[in-house]
Image (spheres, helix red, strand yellow):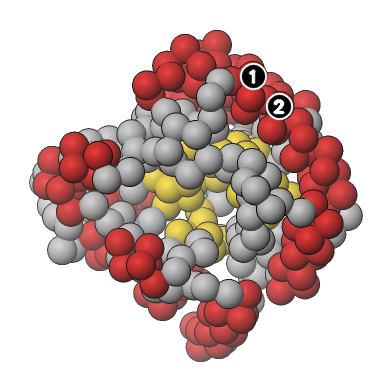
Amino acid sequence: MRFLLGLPTDDVAKREEFGSAEAVVEMARAAEALGYEGIYVTDHPAPRKSYIDAGGHHALEPSVVLAVAAGATSRLRLMTNLYVLAYRNPFLAAKAIASLDSLSGGRVILGTGAGYLEPEFRALGADFARRNQALDDALDLIKRVFSGEPVDAVGPGFEACETVALPLPVQRPHPPIWIGGNSRRALRRAVEKADGWIPMPAPRGLAKHVRSAPLESVADLAAALCYAREHAERVGRSAPLALMFAPMLPGYAEPGFDADAYVAASAGLAELGVGYAGVSFAYPGRSAIASRARFLELAEGFARDVVERCRAL
């Protein structure tokens, strides 16, 4: 089991603590030194005030944050979790991801999903009702762009004729693409178009809010993986999916955290085929981490109590 550490760059009110280049560099270097597989950041270009007031969060532009981290590290994987392709012109998205992969020497993981905030889609001029189709189309198109061959394509608001976009990503044929979301459609998308799947623990209330399917237990995860295997057989996919999912237990900074239980749960997930887990010490938007020093203290403790013990899983 390998762990990717979420950076609290959503806490934009604490810019000096979490949102400066100095902060990103220090957190990224610490993650690499402590043995984390990678880091990840989230994506919200234009959220509505009511979403923020209700506990939602801002985000720095993912490719910019991860480029700063790339320049300060040499091994750390750089993950978008999640980068909403449907918000963006696919050629611009492909350029951002290819540039980041080139600058980092091939360390990007493109985590992407359909998105769920309708007002944010409207603010960005994107079609919320068409978001799933837009994501599927974007995945197909960026792979063509990443081939280096001239691309002809027509879509909402764009028309490309013999378009070539360099540099190409270092990772060939493209950086790993991991699909977020719990729905059957998200699972089919992961099987048919991607390299990995990122389900998320989601009680029914949260699932409704983020417009996904509930996932409330390891049994739910196992059932979803069974469906994924069946669909892979139907479409002729033989390559395994990379899986990223964390134990559904109290987090490291929460009351009731039990390192032994967490390691045991990680071992159980590994038996299901889960190879990666994301770890965040505060839910985005909660501003629960007081300072960068506290974040680094938590990152070191979790690495000692969990990461090192899970390396063999």
Secondary structure state at the residue bearing disc 2: helix
Kindly identify the amino acid type of the residue bearing the numbered disc 1.
Ala
- In the picture of the structure, the residue carrying the numbered disc 2 is 297
Q: Is residue 51 above or below residue 58?
A: below
Residue 177 visible? The answer is yes
Kindly identify the amino acid type of the residue bearing the numbered disc 2.
Glu
Secondary structure state at the residue bearing disc 1: helix
Q: Are marks 1 and 2 in contact (CB under 8 Å)?
A: yes
- In the picture of the structure, the residue carrying the numbered disc 1 is 293
Front position in the image: 112 or 270: 270
Q: Is residue 125 above or below residue 243?
A: above
Where is residue 206 shown, x and y percent of the image? 38, 63
Q: Say left or right for 201 vs 73.
A: left
**Residue 94 shows which numbered tag?**
none
Q: Quadrant of residue 162?
A: top left
Residue 144 visible? The answer is no
Residue shown at 49% from the left, 72% from the top: 215
Residue shown at 43% from the left, 19% from the top: 14
Q: Residues within 10 Å of mark 1 (few under 14, many from 20)?
A: few
Q: Say left or right for 66 vs 137.
A: right
